[in-house]
Image (cartoon, helix red, strand yellow):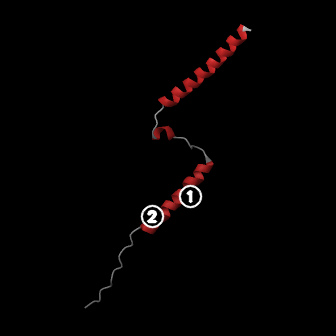
Amino acid sequence: MAQEKLEERVAELEKQLADMKRRIEMLSRPNDWRSAVGMFAGDEGMKEIFEEARKIREEDRRLTKPKSPKRKKRAHS
């Protein structure tokens, strides 16, 4: 009976150790834009979202682009 309790305790400690190692690894990663690089590589859903966003940006640029002033034709004297 004592052997079973010891095995259970060791198994629980091994789980806790694995969890602590995972947490330490996560904390040691850079927490900036570099952690997101490649996150959506090959994701078809994200490709569609990026394409729609590009279309929206292009339309916004087209709508906000300054219009060239109209030139008045000069009458020849």
Q: Position of residue 35 (x, y in %)?
A: 49, 37
**Which residue was labeled with disc 2?**
61
User: Few, some or many C-alpha atoms within 10 Å of disc 1 (few <14, some 14-19, many ≥20)?
Assistant: few
Element type at mark 2: helix
Residue at the limit of the structure toward the left, as seen here:
77
Amino acid type, residue under disc 2 in the picture: Arg
Whole-percent x and y of residue 73?
Answer: 32, 85
Res. 64 mark = none
Residue corresponding to mark 1: 52
Depth check: give the residue in front, 22 or 9: 9
Residue 61 image position (x, y, % from top left): 45, 64
Please name whichever residue, 70 or 2, is drawn nearer the observer in this view of the structure.
Answer: 2
Residue sitting at x 66%, y 17%: 11
Residue 25 vertical placement versus 66 (above, below): above
**Depth check: 42 or 26 in front?**
26
Residue at (33, 80) in percent of width and height: 71
Is 33 on the left or on the right of 44, as rendered?
left
Mark 2 Cα-neighbour bin, 10 Å: few <14, some 14–19, many ≥20:
few
Say which of 17 and 28 sits in front: 17
> Residue drawn 48% across and 60% down?
57
Mark 1 to mark 2 CA distance (whole Å) = 14 Å
How many marks can you see?
2
SS assignment at label 1:
helix
**Residue 56 vertical placement versus 38 (above, below):** below
* Residue positioned most to the right: 1
Amino acid type, callout 1 = Glu
Position of 66 relative to 70 (above/below): above
Q: Quadrant of the N terminus?
A: top right
Asked whether disc 1 touches disc 2, contact meaning CB atoms under 8 Å apart, the reply is: no
Counting residues from the start of the chain, the first of labels 1 and 2 encountered is 1
**Residue 50 percent across, percent down from the top left:** 55, 53
Residue at 52% x, 61% y is 56
